[in-house]
Image (cartoon, helix red, strand yellow):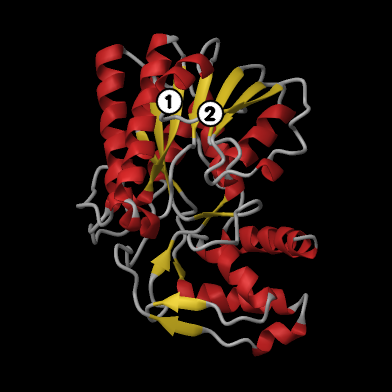
Amino acid sequence: MILENKSVLVTGGAGFIGSNICEVLIQQNNKVSCLDNFITGKKENISHILDHPNFLLIEGDIRDEECCNTSTKNIDVILHQAALGSVPRSIEDPIKTNEININGFLNILNAAKLNNVKRVVYAASSSTYGDSKTLPKVEHQIGLPLSPYAVTKYVNELYAHVFSNIYDMEIIGLRYFNVFGRKQDPNGAYAAAIPKFIKAFKEYQSPIIHGDGSQTRDFTYIDNVIQANQLAATTTNPKAINQVYNVACGEQSILLELINKLKDLLSNFDSKIKDVEIIFGPERVGDVKHSLASIKKAKELLNYNPTHNVKAGLDAAIDWYWEYFKSN
């Protein structure tokens, strides 16, 4: 199911995931409102749709209750992507992380209630699994959180559960697992692993792995995430509503193997990259050691079916980044 002919609010719509969602929704004849404060979002991510007649940019902050109330008027569906991401950033600034991720989310939920928004889909996180050693990760088995960021994303799920029960709202959470792909920012202290590694190799700089490289992740290409958001926004299956789902590939990648694969793929563009060495640094506080998602629930209830495995996602991402770095 695709989301079409609706009025949709995308919070964090100028960010990595949000801007990709906005772009697809515009193509599908939706009226799209993008709410972003540009703390981490970038205007360049949405520059090509800024002048589209069905696109509205709202420069505002989800911490502003009035802004949330105004932005959610006459909206059919909210796709809530706005958050202050990154485990290390949350450890450095837990107060700001809490304000944006918890207070901001509560403002959006309350505004949705006041304005009778039909469906709210929100970005949850695999960080909610915390110290649980169980693999694969299944939705009903979580551990204790390992970072302030993880706490905030778990609280989002609790608020969603309470609002759906008390106010009879339709709310669906999507626990993203290590999303990557086009428009993910490779710059800055909190850049995600894959774009950061690509940038390092492109500049003949040694990428740094925190730990020995044996940690595993379920890397998920952006198009799979867009699909999950659309399915969650459009499902008519009563059993699928007011649930939380893993959004992943269901494929476990060892970090050192992944970075060597990146190196090989990038060497096809520039043979000098073969000579770049990988450096190992100290483990990061708050990091989960191993991650692998079960996507059975999303498949059964939402008909989720990832279009890109990790290899296909890496191929697409590298093509995009190589072009991106030519002009940046």
Instruction: Point out the image quarter for the N terminus.
Output: top right
**In the displayed structure, would residue 105 be above or below residue 285?**
above
Amino acid type for the residue under numbered disc 2: Gly
Q: Locate residue 149 relative to residue 112 in the image: left or right.
A: left
The reply to whether dot 1 and dot 2 touch (C-beta < 8 Å) is yes
Q: Is residue 3 visible?
A: no
| Numbered circles on residues, count | 2
Image coordinates of residue 156 in percent, x first then y, are 32, 35
Q: Is residue 202 visible?
A: yes
- Quadrant of the rendered structure where residue 239 is? top left
* Depth order, front residue of 182/245: 182
The residue at the point 30 percent across, 42 percent down is 152
Residue placed under numbered mark 1 in the picture? 64
* Residue type indicated by callout 1: Asp
At 31% across and 20% down in the image, what residue appears? 164
- Where 7 falls versus 2 (above or below)? above
Report the quarter where the C terminus lies: bottom right
Where's residue 31, x and y in %? 67, 19
Residue 155, disc:
none
Disc assigned to residue 60: 2
State the residue lying farthest toward the left.
144
Q: Position of residue 290 (x, y in %)?
A: 34, 65
